Amino acid sequence: MRSIWNGAISFGLVSIPIKLVNATENHSIHFRQIHLADGGRIRYRKVCELDEEEVAGGEIGKAYEDADGTMIPITDEDLAQLPLPTAKTIEIVAFVPADQIDPLQMDAAYYLSANGVPAAKPYTLLREALKRSNKVAVAKYALRGRERLGMLRVVDDVIAMHGLLWPDEIRAPEGVAPEGDVTVRDAELDLADALMDTLGEVDMDSLHDDYREAVEELIAAKASGETVRPAESGDAGGGKVIDLIAALENSVQAAKKSRGEEGAGAEGEGEGDGGMADVHPIKKTSGKSSSQPTKKSTAAAKKSTPKSTGAKKSTSTTKKATAKKTTKTAAKKQTSSSGGSGAKKTASSRKRTSA
């Protein structure tokens, strides 16, 4: 990677020669301005407003415009002679916990590369010291004509630097928060928590720029002469929330459906009661509509109830009669059986007596 700045890190009395390399790149699609009448490209030319002639880049310098419109020329030599230690040095001024850095201050990101073999040892020393301390280094440096604030931290085995905005460059959020007192119910907070849990975490590497891909497909289609069909417009809701509870419940169900969880298709359960909404997965049942009785079938069942009651009575009477007959038959068999055995015993005893 090509370096954009060469200098050194000042770590106390230790100087570490480094190269500054861009850590990010821009993948945005850039468009040109054209003349709609003939498709000719619109170009901007740098013209001197005094003689109205185009000026080449080598003849252009920089100047500061005073309040009265006077131009005060400033050369690169003037800036190089400024008595600033950060002109060619990233000067570390403190080591602080990372959570003390306001994310609003984060700006461009750079990689710091050791410049030469002698820089390898002090570079590694600073990197390992940052790792062990679990802190970041706050530094000052000069780049592109101004002194800046930076934060040094370790990314893998490389020291990275994030440009930071100065604290006075962060605007106060005045007039941004909603006006008036807004009350949020516990049920709404519970549903918001459930939605956050359902959405869960995401692999940051899996995220990509859908808009850029769509623009690339559009360009490819028009370049090949294909007809571009307008995309179907989805219902984004128009920013109107009629029922916050219902919207949260539907959001939870939609998130579950997108993740393929069970019971994601059932929506609207527990709406409108104003209480705690049940956001647990709902088990699907087959034939739900057929198992639910209708008014007609209920009425028919009621009409047929007396008949079925009579049938039950007759069936009960028949069973009782059958049971009595069975009992009598069993008693007769038992009597006859006992009588027969008694007769046999008597005959046997008579024979023995006669003998």
Image (tube, grey):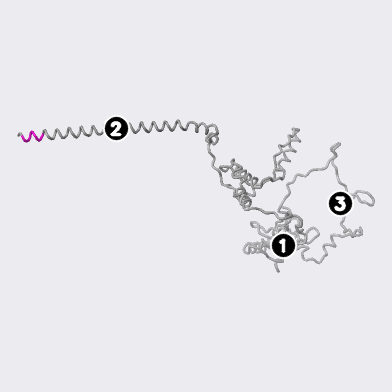
Q: Is residue 351 magenta?
A: yes
Q: Is residue 306 magenta?
A: no
Distance, label 1 to label 2, CA atoms, is 112 Å
Magenta-highlighted stretch: main secondary structure? helix
Please give the count of numbered marks on the rendered protein: 3
Quadrant of the rendered image containing residue 308: top left
Residue beneath disc 3: 57
| Amino acid type for the residue under numbered disc 2 | Thr
Q: Nearer the viewer, mark 1 or mark 2?
A: 2
Which circle's residue, 3 or 2, is located before the other in the chain? Answer: 3
- Decide: few, some or many residues near mark 2? Use Cα within 10 Å; few <14, some 14-19, many ≥20: few
- Residue 78 x %, y %: 85, 62
Residue beneath disc 1: 17
Judged from the image, the secondary structure of the residue bearing numbered disc 2 is helix
Judged from the image, the secondary structure of the residue bearing numbered disc 1 is strand
| Residue depicted at x 86% and y 46% | 44
Quadrant of the rendered image containing residue 37: top right
Region rendered in magenta: 348-353
- Residue 164 x %, y %: 74, 59
Quadrant of the rendered image containing residue 62: bottom right
Q: Nearer the viewer, mark 3 or mark 2?
A: 2
Which circle's residue, 1 or 3, is located before the other in the chain? Answer: 1
Distance, label 3 to label 2, CA atoms, is 122 Å
Which residue of the protein is positioned furthest toward the right in this rendering? 51
Above or below: residue 257 compared with residue 99 = above
Distance, label 1 to label 3, CA atoms, is 32 Å
Q: Are marks 3 and 2 in contact (CB under 8 Å)?
A: no
Give me the disc on residue 326. 2
Q: Nearer the viewer, residue 212 or 185?
A: 185
| Amino acid type for the residue under numbered disc 3 | Gly
Q: Are marks 1 and 3 in contact (CB under 8 Å)?
A: no
Which circle's residue, 1 or 2, is located before the other in the chain? Answer: 1
